[in-house]
Image (spheres, helix red, strand yellow):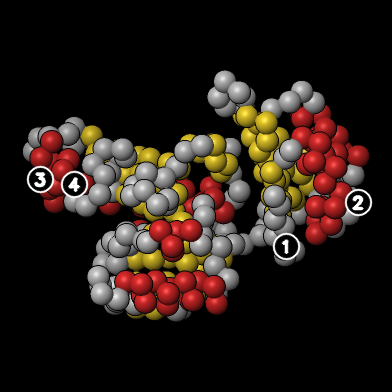
Amino acid sequence: MCAVAESSPLKNSAILLLRCPDRKGLDAAIADFIYWHGGDILHFEQHQPGVERFYLARLEWDLAGFEFDLKDFPKWFAPIAEQFSIQWRVSTSNYRPRVAIFVSKYDHCLVDLLYRQRTGELACEIPLVISNHPDAKNHADFYHIPYTVIPVTKENKQEAERQQIELLRKNNIELVVLARYMQVLSTSFIEQFPQQIINIHHSFLPAFIGAKPHQQAFDRGVKIIGATAHYVTEVLDDGPIIEQGVERVSHRDTIEDLVKKGRDIEKVVLSRAVRWHIENRILLYGNKTVIFE
């Protein structure tokens, strides 16, 4: 399995993500391949989780002096990939993936993501925002990003998702971010974007799954609330967790206080998860994620 992303002339390095059964000689074979083709390794991190020690790695190298174009990487890397049964993908560090943001009425995560993208903290393109409500349109307008309202009801959900998918395909979207989008995506939608949908859930999963987690937390009398960014799977709020954050609460806090504190956590947690994804720092192992620094 392989994928190659095209590059543009900014930072001149490449990133290779790998996963395969662990075997002796893997590090040496990969490092030698980069060295003998003129690459200067900048970072090389690996992890072997589980008793079977499955091999996960992230390698970044300087492309200055590298002897072939990255578009030819599959041809040159094929012998090593076949020898070690490696699943891999490669990209340049300056590649800016195309990201779509889904939002409902709560706009704090949307505003944060748009700001971080504009300031360069999130190295991606955001060509569209999709919502089931018009409430957050002014924020997209401020950044001159098209904002499409597609109302969703029980009766029109299938048609609404068809329109959404059509927009995503038309805009060549590579990552969908659910920035407090208060709709459950269908299995058919999720299957079209495997490991390409990130959601922010306003609780510290696996606690308080589903709707109204702040009310659930308040009723339970918790002393810590949190937020969880995770990849979306067919099982509600059960996808691989990317990042989490917490904040202490008091018996004096009302539900409104919990919501306010939760919003601050949600913004930070979601932005980190999106940044790590677009910087090619995440590899999945079962229902877990490995985040390389």
Please tell me the numbered disc located at residue 7: 1
Label for residue 214?
4
Residue at 18% over, 37% down: 249
Q: Is residue 165 left or right of residue 58?
A: left
The residues bearing labels 3 and 4 have C-alpha atoms spaced at a distance of 10 Å
Label 4 crowd bin: few (<14), some (14–19), many (20+), radius 10 Å: many
Nearest the eye: 130 or 234 = 234
Vertical placement of 105 versus 36: above or below? Answer: below
**In the drawing, does residue 173 fall left or right of residue 95?**
left
Q: Is residue 117 visible?
A: no
Q: Amino acid at mark 3?
A: Thr
Residue plotted at (17% across, 34% down): 222
Q: Decide which of tag 2 and tag 1 comes sooner along the chain.
A: 1
* Image spot of residue 81 (x, y percent): 78, 41
Q: Quadrant of the C terminus?
A: top right
Q: Which mark is residue 67?
A: 2
Label 4 or label 1, whichever comes before in sequence order: 1
- As helix, strand or loop, the secondary structure at mark 1 comes to loop
How many numbered marks does the figure carry?
Answer: 4
Residue 156 rendering spot, x and y as whole percentages:
30, 76
Please tell me which of labels 3 and 2 falls first in the chain. Answer: 2
Count neighbours of disc 2 (C-alpha within 10 A) and say few if under 14, some if 14 to 19, many if 20 or more. few
Position of 164 with respect to 127 (left or right) is: left
Give the label, 3 or 4, closer to the camera. Answer: 4
Q: Which mark is on residue 254?
A: 3
Amino acid type for the residue under numbered disc 4 = His
Distance Cα–Cα, label 2 vs label 1: 16 Å
